Image: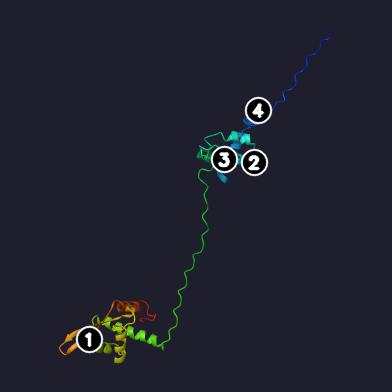
Amino acid sequence: MAEIPAEQSEPNSAPEPSAIGNRLPTAERTTGAAEENRRRIAKLLIERGPMRAGEIAPAVGLSDALVAYYLKRPDWYQKTDPSNRLSPWTVTAEARAAVGANAEPVIAPAPATAPTPAAATPEQPEVDPDDPKVIAREQVLVIARAISEANAKLTREQIVAATGLDEAIVKNRLRNGGPNASLPAFTYFSRTEQPHNEGVHVLWGLTHNGAALVREAERNPQRPSGA
């Protein structure tokens, strides 16, 4: 009777464990592709910031199982929140150094812009020299300057002599810029009665407002002074 040859066994068609995510594919173990893929993942996280594993896989063109395998390298990858297994992944300083990114990404400074031009000083309105208010302000200033330059209180007669103004004008400006001022801010002259062997002399000095009026006129001679 003829011998029946033994049946040859069928080749094992079961997939390699790596195909279902249990091991690194043989090709990658022998060609160094694993290291290259780790670098790709690290560069991705450096460029885009923390990402979840499910977001990394399609971005680098790898399966979820392989990405999960590569992320198991604590010296390169770590969770942003170690207490939360679902938190995104980020890279360590060692991974940055390995891929040539030692420092955090530097944000380029915004381009310098030309300095904003200073606002133009508004021009002073033209002054009508014939305006009665302008004339009154100038007369008040002339009297205040005379008292300031004398550095003493003066009688009305002395003010007339020092300013060259008409006596009636001096009398009116001293009264309206002194005791009869409409507002405290317009009180430029102080009135003092001083006993004299011929009776009583009325002396005129400057208030704080009067002294400030003179100082302002010296700083800005183009601006109408007084009120």
Q: Residue at x 58, y 41 (%)?
A: 52
Q: Which residue is drawn at 63% across and 36% down?
A: 64
User: Tag 3, which secondary structure?
Assistant: helix
Q: Which of 175 and 110 is in front in this view?
A: 175
Q: In the image, what residue type sits under mark 2?
A: Pro
- What label sits on residue 163 in the rendered view? none
| Res 202 label | 1
Residue placed most toward the observer, 197 or 66? 197
Circles 4 and 3: CB distance less than 8 Å? no
The residue indicated by pointer 3 is 42
Q: Could you tell me the amino acid type at mark 3? A: Ala
Distance Cα–Cα, label 4 vs label 1? 118 Å
Lower sequence index among marks 4 and 1:
4
- Left or right: 112 as drawn, with respect to 213: right
Query: Residue 23 at what x, y percent from top left?
Result: 62, 29
For residue 97, above or below residue 209:
above
**Where does the N terminus fall, quadrant-wise?**
top right
Res. 166 visible in picture = no
Q: In this view, does 112 lie above or below 23?
A: below
Mark 1: which secondary structure? strand
Quarter in which the C terminus is drawn = bottom left
Q: Can residue 186 be seen in this view?
A: yes
Q: Regarding mark 2 in the picture, which secondary structure is present there?
A: helix
